[in-house]
Image (cartoon, rainbow, N blue to C red):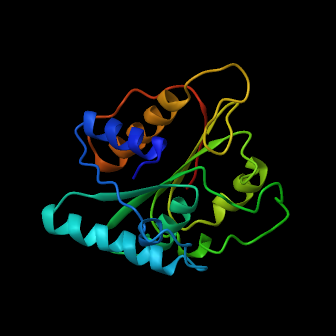
Amino acid sequence: MKNRLVRQVAVAAAEHGILAVRMNFRYVDAKSSASRDLSREEDDLLGAVRFLRKELAEAPIYVAGKSMGARVCARASHDADVAGVIALGYPLHPMFKPEVRNPPEWPMLVKPALFVQGDQDPFCDLARLREELPRLVQPYDLVVIPDAGHSFEAKAAKRDTFQEIRHALLTWVDRYSRRSPVERQPADADRGN
């Protein structure tokens, strides 16, 4: 819950009139390690989804995660209450090893998804990601943040990349929620399906 990017995303959503709930996985509070297959973390996320569904009978629920949290969101996308997935800095492969194939959560990702990636992310080679995306069964969007790393840290000129991330996620949620559309910004964006 203290992650700066997660906090910024929640604030941006709230300012846009979208209820945003942040949570910790239980391993964080226990000061231990994540489960090897991320099944406990998936249970934690789905617990939050159940809580939200009780409060919001009709509204779509989108799950968003950064890095490992994005993998957990992919796993949880099978749930009927999950309308879509927002993956920020999806770790497609181990650091600097794009030759490692078959991301384990890929077959589990069964809802529309937005991928926001830095173009210099050592955990996600963009050429590899573009090879993998067509394997998804639902529509996807890819927004690439130029000159940014895994945590969207600027790699060239010092800048705050969050406005680019904010625009990408609010545009996507608006489109999938059928809210009034946010003006599209020209970007390196791919749209699938």
Residue occupying image coordinates x 16% and y 61%: 58
The answer to which quarter of the image holds residue 111 is bottom left
- Residue 71 is situated, as x and y percent measured from the top left of the image, at 55, 65
Q: How many marks on residues? A: 0
Task: Give the left or right position of residue 192, taking residue 86 as reference.
Answer: right
Q: Which residue appears farthest toward the front when viewing the image? A: 31
- Residue 91 is situated, as x and y percent measured from the top left of the image, at 66, 58
Task: Give the left or right position of residue 81, taking residue 146 as reference.
Answer: left
Residue occupying image coordinates x 48% and y 42%: 5
Residue occupying image coordinates x 49% and y 56%: 113
**Vertically, is 183 above or below 132?**
above
The answer to which quarter of the image holds residue 21 is bottom left
- Residue 54 is situated, as x and y percent measured from the top left of the image, at 15, 69
Q: Is residue 57 visible?
A: no
- Residue 35 is situated, as x and y percent measured from the top left of the image, at 55, 78
**Vertically, is 118 above or below 31?**
above
The answer to which quarter of the image holds residue 184 is top left
Residue occupying image coordinates x 64% and y 66%: 135
On-image quarter of the C terminus: bottom right
Q: Is residue 43 visible?
A: yes
Task: Give the left or right position of residue 6, taking residue 146 as reference.
Answer: left
